Structure formats: C-alpha cells, structure tokens
Image (cartoon, rainbow, N blue to C red):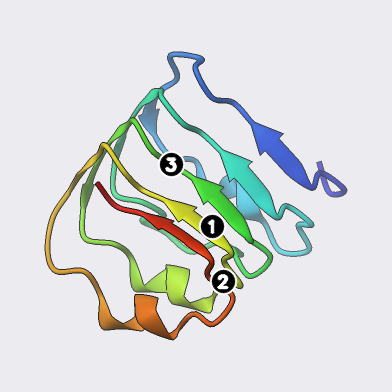
C-alpha cells in the first residue's frame, strides 16, 4: 500500500491496538480515519512514519494514556481524539502546530 493516501475504516467494530505498520517509511498516507471502532491502548506506541499525516480521526475509541509527542512532528490540519480515555495534560506543543485548523478533544 505504498501509494495509499487516504484510509477510512470508521464504524467497522475494529478492536485491539493500533497497528503502526499503516505508517511505514515512504508512506504517502495523509488521511487516517479510524473513528468509532473499539481500538484501545496508546496512540502510536511504537515508531512509525507519521510525517505526512494531515488529517487524523481517532475519535470514538478506547485509546488511553497521554497524547503522544510524536504527533507534534506531523503537519496536522485536523486532529480528532474526542471520546477516548486519554489522560494527562493537554500538551503545550499542540498550540505550536501552525497548520492545525481543527482540534477536538472532548
């Protein structure tokens, strides 16, 4: 899936942890939508290339832990992490992503 740019697997009852293999080196993936599944664990717990991610929708899952600093390196325009079980403070670096136009953390 080297040329894959958009992946939408919303509302599929997917469960388990997020497979970072979706974002391998050389990936062109810029939109990832995994909304309203049953995914759990930390968001991007291991290394992977998310440097192209502009639109990231992980809302409506069971992700836990803090918002990962790894997201600060992505040119995000939209970040939706709402309706999860995230913990910790809202990171200051979120305010430094100049490309970010939509942020949902409810």
Q: Which residue is pictured at 66% across the width and 48% down the height? A: 31
The x and y percentages for residue 20 are 52, 49
Spatial distance from mark 1 to mark 3, Cα to Cα?
Answer: 11 Å
The x and y percentages for residue 67 are 29, 62
Q: Which residue is mark 1?
A: 78
Q: Is residue 48 left or right of residue 16?
A: right
Between 82 and 1, the one lying in front of the other is 82
Asked if 12 appears above or below 61 in the picture, the reply is: above
Q: Nearer the viewer, mark 2 or mark 1?
A: 1
Q: Is residue 28 left or right of residue 96?
A: right
Tell me, yes or no, whether the two marked residues, 2 and 1, touch with CB atoms within 8 Å.
no
Between 13 and 23, the one lying in front of the other is 13
Classify mark 1: helix, strand or loop: strand
Number of disc labels:
3
Q: Name which quarter of the figure residue 26 lies in.
A: bottom right
Asked if 93 appears above or below 28 in the picture, the reply is: below
Classify mark 3: helix, strand or loop: loop
Q: Residue furthest left?
A: 88
Asked if 67 appears above or below 16 in the picture, the reply is: below
Q: Which residue is pictured at 54% across the width and 24% down the height? A: 10
Q: Nearer the viewer, mark 1 or mark 3?
A: 1
The x and y percentages for residue 1 are 81, 41
Asked if 24 appears above or below 71 in the picture, the reply is: above
Q: Is residue 85 left or right of residue 47?
A: left
Q: Is residue 18 left or right of residue 76?
A: left
Crowd rating for badge 1 (residues with CA inside 10 Å; few <14, some 14–19, many 20+): some
- Residue 58's tag is 3
Q: Which residue is mark 2?
A: 74
């Amino acid at each position: 899936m080297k040329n894959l740019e958009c992946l939408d697997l919303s509302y599929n009852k997917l469960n388990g942890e997020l497979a970072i293999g979706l974002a391998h080196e050389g990936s062109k993936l810029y939109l990832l939508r995994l909304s309203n599944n049953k995914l759990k664990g930390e968001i991007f717990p291991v290394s992977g290339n998310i440097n192209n991610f502009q639109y990231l929708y992980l809302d409506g899952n069971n992700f836990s832990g803090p918002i990962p600093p790894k997201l600060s390196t992505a040119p995000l325009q939209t970040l939706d992490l709402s309706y999860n079980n995230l913990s910790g403070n809202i990171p200051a670096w979120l305010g430094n992503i100049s490309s970010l136009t939509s942020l949902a953390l409810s």
